[in-house]
Image (spheres, helix red, strand yellow):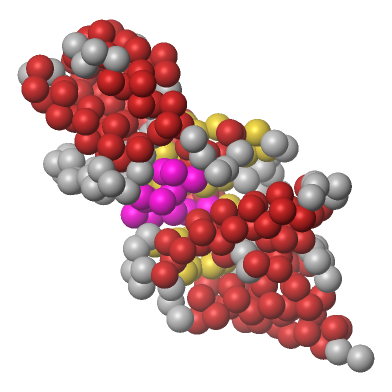
Amino acid sequence: MPGPKDLDPSTSPRALLGAELRFAREKTGLTQDELGQPLFVSGSFIGQLESGTRRMHLEYARQIDQILGTEGFFSRNCVAAAKSKYPDHFAEAAEAEAVATTIREYAPLLIPGLLQTEAYARAVFRAYQPTAPEAVIDELVAARLERAQILTDPTTPLLWAVIDEAVLRREVGGAEVMAEALAHIAALGFRHRVIVQVLPFSAGGHAALDGGLKLMAFADAPPLAYVDGLGTGWLQDDPATVARHTLTYDLVGASALSPKQSLALIESVAEDYAHEDQP
């Protein structure tokens, strides 16, 4: 397994905790597995805390302080590290997404957050919260666009999205918004920055009918899977569970159109929306 990467403690409280945890653990001579045993977690989970892919919760912080003799350091600081601009059910997944090397996602209902335009994201959040003040919507949109900044790097992470055809046909925000949103995805695909496939209606039943799925791989930590529902989400690291979700994603991808066919369809639907918007 690759050695742990050097973290920049100045990047976030979570990165600071990860770096300090690794330092304190190595100082006491414990392996990741040995530290994980009294916490009833795997050594891989400890590695994810150290690499910054998982958030440290208060119950773990208190036990770590006792085991490593760190005099309450982790208990005092994990609260700050837990603060997030994202909803509670998605916060850990968003933090892991930011350091992933590969992200594979199946989106059954909406354009994946990393691929959304500002106008599309605003329409989505307004639909979620029809009576929210505009300032609240502005904050949500800003957080979503900030997430998408990881795609400004020309190569990392690798993003591979399988989008259900329903996503293309559901007119979120109106024809003009949809035309822009789909053109944005097509542009990223044609620039070879992302891989996109469309799962057509003609595929019929498939392995992910239950909902959305995101798989994340890391340079120095085991992979994670994130599954979501209405206002809920679960980040999973159990190897058997991640393997099962990986198979699900592979089966969905096998039923989808090729990337070339998918981009042609996305571009065609975008043009239909653009013509629909014209007088």
Can the viewer see residue 44?
no
Outermost residue on the right side: it is 279
Which quadrant holds the N terminus? top left
The structure residue drawn at horizontal position 28% and vertical position 46%, both measured from the top left corner, is 10
Rendering coords of residue 88 (x, y %): 58, 33
Q: Is residue 132 above or below residue 78?
A: below
Q: Is residue 237 above or below residue 187?
A: above
**Image position of 132 (left or right of 108):** right
Which quadrant holds the C terminus? bottom right
Number of numbered discs: 0
Rendering coords of residue 136 (x, y %): 71, 49
Given residues 14 and 253, the one toward you in this image is 14
Outermost residue on the bottom side: it is 279
Q: Which residues are magenta?
A: 94-105
The structure residue drawn at horizontal position 61% and vertical position 39%, both measured from the top left corner, is 87
The structure residue drawn at horizontal position 37% and vertical position 50%, both measured from the top left corner, is 100
Can the viewer see residue 224?
yes
**Image position of 1 (left or right of 179):** left
The structure residue drawn at horizontal position 28% and vertical position 37%, both measured from the top left corner, is 16
Rendering coords of residue 176 (x, y %): 78, 78
Query: Dividing the picture into quarters, in which one does residue 153 lie?
Result: bottom left
